[in-house]
Image (spheres, helix red, strand yellow):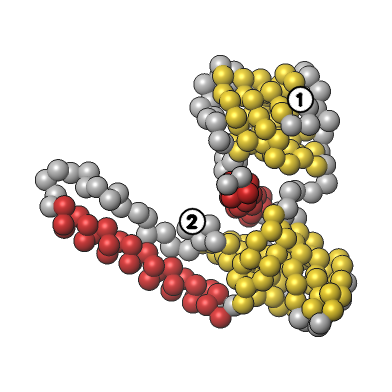
Amino acid sequence: NLAPGEKVFYKALPEVVNQRGTVISADDKTIVLGVEAGQGIEAGKHLMISWDEQQCFAEVVEQGEGILTLRRIWSNGREYFRVDDVVPMIVRKVGEDESLTVSRLIPFFDAGVLDAESPDLDVNPKLWQMLVNIQSMLGMVLERLDLETAGFQRSGKKRVNMSATGMRFQAGERYEVGEKLEIKMLLPARPPFGVIVYGSVIRVDDLGGGENEIALQFYDISDNLRDEIIRYSLTRLREIIRNSSK
């Protein structure tokens, strides 16, 4: 637990540089953090706070001069928060003699988005709308090519429960505890991006009907890849909270 006066490190995702702050107050729901003034961390930003080998993810709800008021999203000393989703995924068992490559991102092309209104009054509005439509179609074509190149066009969708340290998913195949798996996933962010991660099966539960729930622990994940999964999970979590409040 955090205590007033405790020194912590924090970073505003997706930044990678840690800053140093001081806890002013903290309870199960809220953290008030003293920080260096003028950092421009606005309400709605997500922070990752680290101290004593523990981590906490929080959302900025109020920003003052040298003070951030945060709402805890998740806190745990052992692993990251988990979210549920349905994603295109390909699972492959890694052979015992097969050398593993490094877990990595599969970035997709981002064609960008043009403003619906022309920034220049001299541009014909109909011509600008035509450019907007062409840009949109180009983005869809390039995204489809990326999906085909990465093999996701032929992948089935699976319901997953995922964190930055591991995941659970259902499969008709039977895997054994200790086996190594290669997971290729498409995370539907904007723009979408794929990940290839490797992990070890730590639990297998028989669900009946030929279905099994597989628990996988990731290994050899870079900080960059972990941060991307965290950022995606935070976005997904906010969508779930927003939809549940409607």
| Number of residues whose C-alpha sits closer than 10 Å to that of mark 2, classed few (under 14), some (14–19) or many (20 or more) | few
* Residue depicted at x 82% and y 42%: 77
Where is mark 2, residue-wise? 190
Q: In this view, does 170 lie to the left or right of 64?
A: right
- Quadrant of residue 63 within the rendered picture: top right
Residue beneath the point at 81% across and 75% down: 212
Lateral position of residue 153 relative to residue 157, left or right: left
Q: Mark 1 points at which residue?
A: 26
Q: What element carries label 2?
A: loop
Residue drawn at x 86%, y 71% is: 204
Q: For mark 1, does the 10 Å Cα neighbourhood hold few (<14), some (14 to 19), or many (20 or more) residues?
A: some
Judge whether 167 appears above or below 24 on screen: below
Tell me if I can see residue 16 in this picture: yes
Q: What secondary structure is found at the residue carrying circle 1?
A: strand
Residue 93: x and y, percent? Answer: 75, 78
Instruction: Give coordinates of residue 111: x percent, y percent.
Output: 37, 59
Mark 2 or mark 1: whose residue is earlier in sequence: 1
